[in-house]
Image (cartoon, helix red, strand yellow):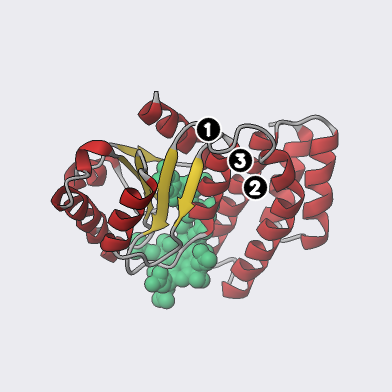
């Protein structure tokens, strides 16, 4: 990882809020690829998640990290969205019913928009009928589902069944991602792909639309 990219990741991981926006700006000035800067922010957030799990960070720290993400994205987003937005296809994205985690989903949304997709972001805790409605209304070619809570993995199956019942399953590819997802789960739920991070998400959706 380049020195500037590392600075972005470290500023977020160490919750150094004053340093995040300047680090992003420096990386941009240095000519770093905005997509890689975003990936460094995702790495920083992932590290914050791990520190929380180890008991070294607390809820208040997660809130700070969320603020840091926002500040970094404010600097980065104008550079990400320059170009071909919406040309590659339409993706309906959400966090599944029963789950309110949205940091990872938002990163995936930003990454896909910057890669040229029209992203219809339905937010969090989204019931399957809303996904069906959005796919139909937007003639989407793909659906991305974020799920972090193990007790909510059944919501993925609910979306798959609802799309089948609506006669739309053949028209859309479905990808899942989030901390509790595995390839075994993806196979069991009958979805088309599993993405480990926002960079992989682009590769997956590019494959869906190629
Ligand atoms: C931040 C956080 C919160 C925040 C959420 C803030 C927000 N606005 O999102 C708050 C504090 C609100 C929260 C609440 C809860 N949380 Co929480 N939370 C986390 C934590 C620490 C980090 C998640 C995160 O943002 N990671 C950083 C992002 C960048 O990573 P990510 O989400 O994995 O996303 C990346 C990839 O997965 C992928 N990806 C994600 N989605 C998608 C979708 C597609 C289509 C693709 C291709 C890729 C993809 O790309 C993303 C970017 O690289 C995790 C721990 C962890 N390791 O995940 C626990 C964790 C997920 N939470 C957990 C729990 C239990 C809860 C609560 C139930 C706690 C409670 N008792 O109230 C509630 C949930 C309430 C609800 N109904 O949803 C558990 C879940 C356990 C489980 N397996 O079921 C975890 C694992 C912590 C733990 N070990 O106990 N949480």
Residue 23 falls left or right of residue 208: right
Q: CA distance from mark 2 to mark 3?
A: 5 Å
Residue 29 visible to an observer of this rendering? yes
Residue 54 visible to an observer of this rendering? no
Other-residue count near label 3 (Cα within 10 Å), few / some / many at <14 / 14–19 / ≥20? many
Q: Splitting the image into 4 quarters, where does residue 65 fall?
A: bottom right
Other-residue count near label 2 (Cα within 10 Å), few / some / many at <14 / 14–19 / ≥20? many
Q: Nearer the viewer, residue 61 or 160?
A: 160
Residue 138: give x, y in percent of width and height: 39, 48
Element type at mark 1: loop
Residue 14: give x, y in percent of width and height: 71, 57
In the displayed structure, would residue 177 be above or below residue 209?
below
Q: Which residue is mark 3?
A: 39
- The C terminus - image quarter: top left
- Do the residues bearing badges 2 and 3 touch, measured as CB atoms within 8 Å? yes
Q: Which residue is mark 1?
A: 87
Element type at mark 2: helix
In the displayed structure, would residue 203 be above or below residue 48?
above
Quadrant of the displayed image that contains ligand 1: bottom left
The verdict on label 3 being within 8 Å of ligand 1 is yes
């Amino acid at each position: 990882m380049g020195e500037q990219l590392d600075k972005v990741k470290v500023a977020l991981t160490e919750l150094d809020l004053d340093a995040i926006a300047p680090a992003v700006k420096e990386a941009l000035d240095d000519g770093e690829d905005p997509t890689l800067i975003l990936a460094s922010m995702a790495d920083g957030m992932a590290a914050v998640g791990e520190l929380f799990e180890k008991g070294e960070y607390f809820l208040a720290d997660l809130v700070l990290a969320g603020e840091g993400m926002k500040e970094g994205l404010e600097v980065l987003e104008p550079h990400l969205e320059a170009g071909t937005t919406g040309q590659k296809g339409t993706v309906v994205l959400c966090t599944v019913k029963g789950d309110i985690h949205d940091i990872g989903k938002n990163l995936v949304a930003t990454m896909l928009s910057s890669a040229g997709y029209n992203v219809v972001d339905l937010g969090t805790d989204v019931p399957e009928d809303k996904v069906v409605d959005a796919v139909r209304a937007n003639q989407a070619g793909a659906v991305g589902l974020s799920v972090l809570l193990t007790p909510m993995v059944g919501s993925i199956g609910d979306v798959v069944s609802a799309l089948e019942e609506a006669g739309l399953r053949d028209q859309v590819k479905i990808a899942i991602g989030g901390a509790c997802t595995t390839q075994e789960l993806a196979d069991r739920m009958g979805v088309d792909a599993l993405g480990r991070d926002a960079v992989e998400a682009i590769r997956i959706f590019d494959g869906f639309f190629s």
